[in-house]
Amino acid sequence: MTMTPPIVDIKDVTFAYNGQTVLRNIDLEIVEGDFIAMIGPNGGGKTTLLKLILGLLKPDAGTIRVMGQPAIKAAPQIGYVPQDVHINRSFPITAIDVVKMGLLAPRRRWRPRASQDRRKAMAALDRLDAAPLANSKMGTLSGGQRQRVFIARALSAGPRLMLLDEPTASIDPQGRADFYKLLETLNQDVAILVVSHDLLTISRYAKSVACVNRQLHYHHQAEITGEMLEAMYPGTPQESCPVELVAHGLPHRVLKDHTRE
Amino acid sequence: MVEALQFEFMRNALMAGLLASILCGIMGTLVVVNRIVFLSGGIAHAAYGGIGLAFYFGWPFLAGTIGFSLASALLMAAVTLKARHRADTIIGVVWAVGMAVGIILLDLTPGYNVDLMSYLFGSILTVPRSDLWMMVAIGILISALVGIYYKDLLALSYDEEFARIRGVPVTLLYFTLIALLAVTIVLVIQVVGLILVIALLTIPPFIIEKHARSLAQMMVGSSILGALFTITGLGLSYTYDLTSGASIILVAGVVFFLFLLLEQILLRFHKKPLP
């Protein structure tokens, strides 16, 4: 029994967009030390749930408390790694300047602290072995390097929770395992909620799984079962299984036999 | 070209061009990285409606134009922020209607005919001193605001959502940016014309974007490049007796296409062989 209050406490949250229910009756607690993989079909509401936690969207019903505060107030204490695809690649900016963005905070605008910001940003990059990239332009970096910079940006202000939205989309399959190992290391100090489609890889590193498809099913073990796949990606297992699942690693951990009575 | 500077009108034209280059270098950088070139076009054209209103109702010219442009610009900004996928359509409508309103109102105004051509291409050779001072004033205002809110503008332009999470007042800042843009465009149009404003807002920042390492560098680089275009264009227009605004734009356009060509060649030259 732990007595520490959860970092995120979502109770019975419903959210509709243009009259269509995107999320219904969502309950979720994120506590210290969690490493939750969030899976589910596209359009199932995963990104919406992240935005609700960050206070960018307001729930139509239910409550979201983050560190005991309303979501939008606590947002600066969460490290957010958005989907890479929305960001302009030719933007004139270096890696270190991107990381410094993570140090922006309300009511700090008028105090210049350039050298301290730089030191903190360098420390965050260094933690991800990305210090040599500090003065490179973002446009010249590979997908994996860019993700390290975005994680450094999320980490720079020392958050207790990190939210990552499909962080491996622009990383090649070999790099993905390394990437999740990196998250595993970071998880020693920071709780992690990561949206992912790499079912197999993520199941080896995450501690629990949240399946989101309008509703949320929470599984305390990082085991991806046939039933879960069935519920999340309707169709027969053969149709719904991404090839990757079968091709790499340990298929028996991923697809359990259906229980027959 | 140097002897041309003995004429006051040439000195004024040069000053107007340089000031316009600086204003457009700063604002154009923000326009290009925020991808609001189309919105800027909308502001610039809809401003003609403001000119029509000012003449028809006999309002003070600047108050009428700036008021109308601010209103239409903020309307377009609200749509871009709320419904991004609808934004281009709404901007297109405001663009066309603003222009049409201006032309009809000028038709209905007895005894006065504003030359549409001078609105489009300006009259940089007849810029009065008072307009120069006005541009200096707006230049100082813009530089100060961009300097104070640099980090926030950077965050807003690079990743709006992240900026919001970090507590940057994104909505307020975005509307302020658009309002400043509207004021800049209206003031500079009077001096150098609508077409030159659009050219100076987009061409120098686009060329510099890939080579700059920060927004500040991009702003300075764009201003310098714009100034070079202006000086070269004015020189050519003086030497060969050509329309000054159009000469400046053509110089910018030629450099723009040469630059694209050179980039393609370099890209091919540097292409790594596939492993």
Image (cartoon, grey):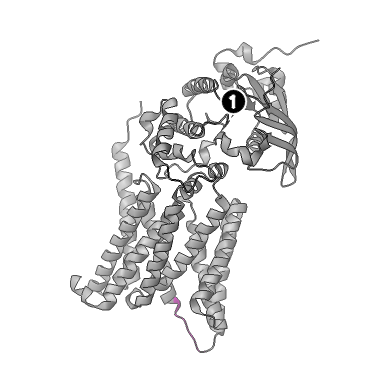
| Residue picked out by circle 1 | A191
Figure quadrant of the C terminus of chain A:
top right
| x, y percent for residue B169 | 56, 50
Protein chain holding label 1 = A
| x, y percent for residue A224 | 66, 18
Task: Please determine whether, in this image, residue B184 is positioned above or below residue A200.
Answer: below
Image quadrant where residue B144 sits: bottom left
Amino acid at pointer 1: Ala
Q: Main secondary structure of the magenta part?
A: loop
Residue at x 43%, y 45% (from the top left corner): A112
Residue at x 70%, y 12% (from the top left corner): A257
Magenta residues (range): B111-116
Residue A8 in view (yes/no): yes
Residue B114 forms part of the magenta stretch? yes
Image quadrant where residue A134 sits: top left
Residue at x 52%, y 23% (from the top left corner): A186
Residue B120 forms part of the magenta stretch? no
Q: Secondary structure at mark 1?
A: strand
Tally the numbered discs: 1
Extreme residue toward the left, this view = B3
Extreme residue toward the bottom, this view = B111
Please tell me which residue lies in front, A230 or A94.
Answer: A94
